[in-house]
Amino acid sequence: MPQFDLHFLAPLTFWSIISFLILMVILYKYALPAITGILDARQEKIKGDIDQAEKLREDAEKLKGEYQRKVIKAEEEAEGKIQAAVVKAKEISDGIVKESHEAAADDRAKAQLGIDIERKKALAEVRNQVIDLTILSSSRLIQQSMQRKTAESLVDDVIKEVGKLS
Amino acid sequence: MKQHNPLEHFELHPLIELKLLGIDISVNKAVIMMWIICILIPALFMFAVRGRRMIPNRLQSLVEISVEFLKNMVVENMGKEGLRFFPFIATLFFFILFCNLLGIIPGSYTVTSQIIVTALFAIIVFIISQIVGLMKHRLRYFKIFVPEGVPKFILPLIVPIEIVSMFARPLSLSVRLFANMTAGHTILIVFFSMAISLKYIGFIPFLVTVPLSGLELFIAFIQAYIFTILTCVYIGEAIKMH
């Protein structure tokens, strides 16, 4: 096999060592630090990003809790306001009903009064008519047949009778 | 028709004759491939991470994932302490991976099919793991050859086995990579030369080379991974002592 030819032992060994050393120095000085630098920088960045995200999440959580409390409070307040409004509305409606009842009662009373007055008026009119008629008829009768005295007593009687009618 | 030697592909020829203090350091095809890799890997990395995008594109993601993957491999096998070996492990992985991958390109040369190269890296890994173990645990490091919970009377048998297995590690590490790369490429060469020499039914071996090339691609990754993870395991064992 040509590889076992020791003729090339010295040059191959020499150049292998030289090449390897040069390559190692270049990689150690330049290439590897560049790569690990990038890797480290990225690691730092990712760590920072995660930390920041965690912080933002915590903040959001806190805000959420705060808003939840606010919402609950607002709901409670709204509930109270609605309750108060309902109570007030009931009061108002009660008042309106009462007022209308009163007004109705008033109207009825007024109407009753009017009716009474009208009736009294009517009665008075009827009485006046009766009186007129009676007087008329009495005066005819007196004129025709009766003495003055009898006529007067008759008139008195009629007046009395009419007076009882009211 | 001239019959090709399937192993001819692995032969090296000096392209530029060079000598340094009497040592032959001639440049050949494998050396040129190493130079290309030395330029290609940093260029690729720098191109991938240019602009240092926070949201990576595909290439940047790929580079980042492979670096993360290697880092996890190091930490898993050696613990946090092992991270100082990370540049070494990463370089080893990418070097072997690109040696394997570029070798698939026709006309190029598979550096890892040279047992001299794989053995060199295996020996370096072995030496590093021994030095790390000795520096960390001093003389207690030799307890690594004495497994815990083994009855005393078997120890004379176990300790030599442990020592042999320890020294077999660089051998197995180097031969595994070298053999995989050599075998894969040899099979590809055999099928390709069949495809040429069989003329009319040459398309049959050619059809075989298509899935084989895919397999080679897969093996290129797997072998780089195996070499690197075994390095992590060996050094990790020296650090943790169990």
Image: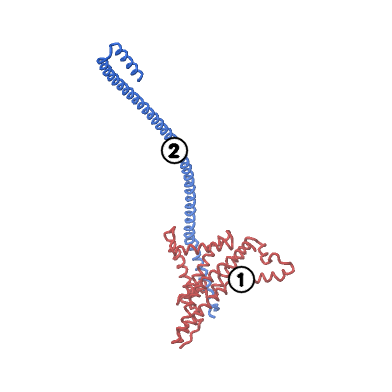
Q: Nearer the viewer, residue B36 or A61?
A: A61
- Whether A117 is drawn above or below A148: the answer is below
Q: Secondary structure at mark 1?
A: helix
* B153 lies left or right of B212: right
Residue located 47% across and 56% down the image: A42
Q: Colour of chain A?
A: blue
Query: Mark number for residue B53?
Result: none
Tell me residue A16's x, y (percent).
51, 70
Residue A146 locus on image (x, y percent): 28, 14
Going by the picture, which residue comes out furthest to the bottom?
B1
Identity of the residue drawn at 26% across and 18% down: A136
The front one of A89 and A4 is: A89
Q: Quadrant of residue B178?
A: bottom right
Q: Which residue is mark 1?
A: B169
Q: Amino acid at mark 2?
A: Ile
Q: Which quadrant holds the N terminus of chain A?
A: bottom right
